[in-house]
Amino acid sequence: MKAPFGLVASLALAGCTAAAIQQGAMAPAADRLALGAGEDWDNPGGDWAESHFSRLTDINPANAGQLGLAWEYDLGTARVQEATPVVIDGVMYHSGNLGRVYALNAATGAELWTFAPEVDMQVNRAVCCDQANRGVAVRGGPDGGTVFVAAIDGWLYALDAGTGAVQWRVDTITDRTRGYTVTGAPELAGDLVIIGNAGAEYDTRGYVTAYNIADGSEAWRFFTIPHDPAEGPQESEALERALATWDAKSRWDIGGGGTVWDAITYDPVFDQVIIGVGNGGPYPLATRSPQGGDNLYLNSLVALDRATGEMKWHFQETPQDSWDLTATQPMVLASLDMDGPGGQGERPVILHTPKNGFFFVVDRETGKPLLAEPIVRVNWANGFDLQTGIARVSPEQADYAQAPKIVFPASSGARNWHPAAFDPTRGLYFANVVDMGNLMFIPPGQENPARRQLGLNASAALIFTSDLEAALPTLPPPVQDAVRASPMWQSVRDNPASSQLRAIDPLTGKTRWSADYMGWQDRSGVLATASGLVIHGDLAGRLIVRDAESGAVLKTIETGSSIMAAPMTYKVDGVQYIAVPTGWGGGGWGFVPGYSAAYHKGNANRLLVFRLGGTDVPIPADLPPLQPAPEPPAQFPDATPAMITMGAGLFTENCSMCHSNQPRAPLPDLRRMGRGIHAAFDQIVLHGAFVENGMPAWDDVLSPAQSKAIHAWLIDEQSKVRARELQLQAEGKPLDSQSLTILSNY
């Protein structure tokens, strides 16, 4: 294979306009057929190829040092920010927590309108990874256009782009007795808007749905995995074929997973919608599909005909999934010159780096993999056969059904939702990459558990290698023995985890240059520009501008707010701007790293917009020092060690996904409850007294006796925490004492 890279304009003009118009789609505008965004940034990915690349050049390596703040906007929240804003005709549209939308003057930051969906906050029972939203889709501009956003409880809204008024809304959830949520951005495809959902770790069966833009009526729906064959024929021929890759006695009752929570991309060249499918549920293949099988179409790229929703091709990136190695990570459409021995010349391709540790180049027309190169330590497979497109799975390394195994990469992924950027002029793909594994095992009693309705059904435990050596003495002796006997143990000790920004050559999968982040939790989206800039944030609150050729830092802007989302750039009235939202959260959100701005200065969500000649960014004040936990009420007279132990287990099973009980966590540390909260404990936990604040009711899961056991354990914990912290205070020592981040989940 060799360079140079080709732009897809000529190919798109030939393949898109005729086919799309013939099938009823709205042909993309001519300026969208060049790779890279222009003065507008018309979808979260920037351009039709979702490359996070801009053709703008006013801000360049020679003047990047002059960047400063143009304006900022307070989003009014303090949770995760994962969306990249959209700018069309001088108006910025940004989505926030739960599916909020903000329309702002892109030159001044003046608020034009806001929208807050009416969310059933009981949905938080099935939210694994914070109240995330990854963006809006916009058809047209502020005059007569429409903004589409999905709320976390599954309702899809069409809003008037000029006023924010609701034009229509539709319920995208097929079964409200299951743990579905929606966190992804809608995708426009001709006259359709397409949305998926999340919840594979709960009790769901994944699908995507296409709706008519005009009125929200359903055009088609594609389920990603089969249903129980005892219930009758499958919904499509593709699912009938997939059924052979599942055990007939699979755990259909739990759902099977396969949700499409991100990575929905319209390809106008072939008038197809390409989706990235999520993990299986439960995690272990031995539980989900006892007789094995590849379990199509889990962890696959699937191309669907835009007009009909019928499958055109698929490529399974992680067969036989037991590791949460999803294919839902963002993809980039491109054209590469694949000449060389056995090469095919310039081909339209997908650049994809999913969780599983491989860099894939996939032919968009056929679904055939052209490159599959590992970019981190990988032991679930030892490579791919590019002729067959099949992974060489390594069960001896990664099948933990009978014994604990150290698996690389971790379930949090070599890559996750954080968008990469592709610069076609330099032939470089810029992305955050995490090299980390996890110890995985099936807890006793979880070998074939009953379905937990609206609850986690992962049925596997994991400990990230970042903390494995420290956690090892606390594990049962057989687990310790399995860890020390693992062929990956020395590798874990040598490099427990690392996070880097990398510039990768897509023709080889090899890294040209890299730059370290502060820790494995420090990962962010990326913007690249034709002028030779690579721009990203970090959790310490810095916006960093680098030279695309070398990675050298050209400018660092201190913001005092943690940045995870990808920046974007646009031009209004002759001025180029760079914008990025701030906010820590997402998977593992309860474990705020001590090096982050969110830990030291709080997590206020802001939109920060920069220009040449701007000013300094106002830095939030430091949070006050932690104080000792307040004195808890007296323990229940009938509390026994057995009750307290039961409460600890119930808390871990039902509460710890959100309440990490860590310092500075986004949700309350329940070891620090005041007397009023203690007094209202059952009203809050069982009866939903705080449901509108996001604390759901649990009376359908927990009995009064179980709620009391949890409360007894928390009182016991609070007493211990208070005693320890009073001692630390007396010794003049800080009270910060984070636990190992061993069960953080992405």
Image: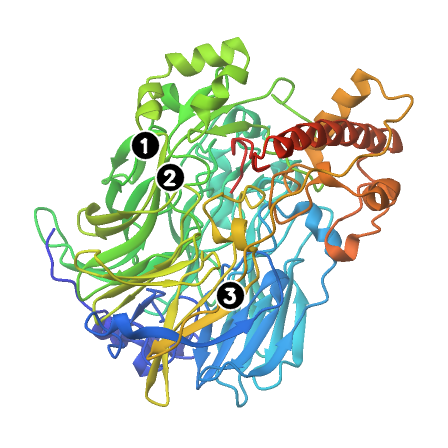
Along the horizontal axis of the image, is 42 left or right of 739? left
Disc 1: CA contacts within 10 A as few (<14), some (14-19) or many (>=20):
many
Along the horizontal axis of the image, is 46 left or right of 251? left
Q: Label 1, on which residue?
A: 378
Using the rendered image of the protein, determine whether residue 399 is visible from the camera's viewpoint: no
| Viewer-side residue, 374 vs 67 | 67
| Viewer-side residue, 663 vs 568 | 663
User: Circles 1 and 2: CB distance less than 8 Å?
Assistant: yes
* First along the sequence among labels 3 and 1: 3
Disc 3: CA contacts within 10 A as few (<14), some (14-19) or many (>=20):
many
User: What type is the residue that disc 1 sits on?
Assistant: Val
User: Circles 3 and 1: CB distance less than 8 Å?
Assistant: no
Q: Label 3, on which residue?
A: 135
Q: Secondary structure at mark 2?
A: loop
What mark, if any, has residue 356 been given in the picture? 2
Along the horizontal axis of the image, is 7 left or right of 442? left
Residue in the image at 53% along x and 80% along y: 104
Considering every residue shown, the one lying at the far left of the view is: 341
